[in-house]
Amino acid sequence: MKHKQPSPIIRTDKWTLNPTAEQRHLFSETVKVYRRLCRYLVGIIFTHWPELGGLSSNEQIPAVERLMHSTGKRPVVKYPQFNRVFYKFPSYYRRAAISFAIGQVNSYMTRYVDWQTGLSRNRRDAKPHKLNADAGCYPVLYKGQCYKLHDYNAVEIKVFTGADWIWTTVQISGLRERHKLPDNKMLSPTLIFNSQVCHLSVPFHCVPPKQNPEQNVVAVDLGINTTATVTVVTFDGTVIHREFVNTGRDIDRRDKRLKSVSMRASKTMGKGGKLHKGFCSKTYQKCANINKQISHIVSKRIVQIASQFNSEAIVFENLKGWTPKGGRKRSNLRQRFHGWLKAKIRDYTEMKWQEKGGKVIDVVAAYTSKLAYDGSGRVKRDSKNYALAVFQNGRQYNCDLNGNQNIAARGILKLTRRNDSEDLSSKRSGGSPRSWACLCDLWTHERLRLA
């Protein structure tokens, strides 16, 4: 049986540049002429796609060059105006533009075929996609030909003056730490420049270090009142760390902006009417940015805890496809569920933890909070404080911590492949499913192992 090769880990750093006023003009001209070439190439590639589409990726770029780039050995080409319009255009910039234009046409043709066959039609009268030649791309820089790095303090970039191509050196004012890791391989950066930003988008092929983890996992329970509850549990069922991660200030900022939307909507349309397209779009965009910041803060802290305890894995509940149920009338429960960052925090955590050589696993979410971690049965929520769980023996415990410890137990059982143990009950025997394991099951395993 062939094992599937793991996909490469590509992460991107932002290197902030500090250009002068003259350099900003040069960058602007470079981006303009690069986008102009991409628009020109999209038309050529789309016209000849029947013969270009069947070629491999290594054969497509030379095939496009034979159509429009004349040389001493190839003086006659089908589109000779290229050398006149784009005089002395650097070869590596040209090939980067060809690669981008091929991607644009290939994506359009794929979506158009899906539309023709009905795979992407949500309605009978759905219109086909349009080919976008003006995609707002940025130039890709190849080492030695388009940029030269000087000790991570400055970078020399080939730019367009409006009439000729020259080299200019710009200071690097800020960068991150991925270039310091010896195993990371720096790939071709992209020059991002517009009226608001100026930086290099630098991708790295990250090679995770080899780990020798301890026998423990980090379990994460993503909630509504508390953003994340984190527990570190060893393989024998010992809880060695508990922590609540809650970004209350950022959540209040987001909710305050969302509440202002309903007030502005009532003033705009009154009791009836219809809101125009794009109503409060800036506010929604700001809230989305706050959600992104919250997710990064929480995921960063989760990874820090996992690194501190040298954990083998981070365990989440499998909440894919979960849909919230509405609350009582006039309650804000539905709105709070819409602000629940269950997917974004999990994805950001996985990306950060994979880069450190760890793994993230998902477990069944059913009955993690309804079952007591000590095996005493189902719990009840306190009528006055919903965050408290009341066990059948009368004990009160934090509901998030209770569920989190059950999540850890299920992750450990899945990690160590103990799901088929005889001492765990199953549906066939009339008990709860094996996937509904609790923390007490780890204690049972440990007693049997020591016996």
Image (cartoon, rainbow, N blue to C red):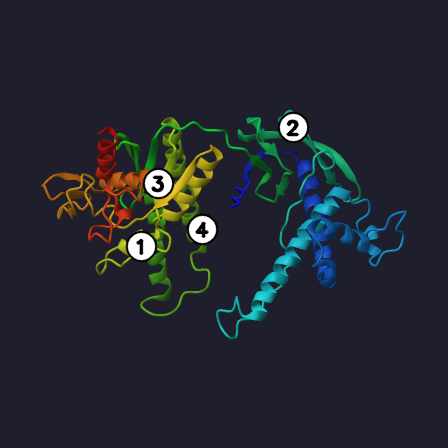
Tell me the number on the disc at residue 447: none
Residue pictured at 82% horizontal, 47% vertical:
87
Give the residue pinned by disc 1: 335
Residue type at numbered disc 3? Arg
Q: CA distance from mark 4 to mark 3?
A: 44 Å
How dense is the environment of label 3, judged by Cα within 10 Å: few (below 14), some, or many (20 and up)?
A: few
Q: CA distance from mark 1 to mark 4?
A: 16 Å
Give the residue pinned by disc 4: 285
Residue type at numbered disc 1? Gln
Q: CA distance from mark 2 to mark 3?
A: 52 Å
**Residue 286 coordinates in the image, percent (x, y):** 43, 48
Q: Secondary structure at mark 4?
A: helix
Give the residue pinned by disc 3: 417
Give the residue pinned by disc 2: 154
Mark 2 or mark 3, which has the lower sequence index?
Answer: 2
**Residue 395 coordinates in the image, percent (x, y):** 12, 39
In this orientation, which residue lies closer to the viewer: 296 or 206?
206
In the rendered image, is residue 154 in sight?
Answer: yes
Residue type at numbered disc 4? Gln
Mark 3 or mark 1, which has the lower sequence index?
Answer: 1
Picture layout, residue 372 above or below residue 329: above
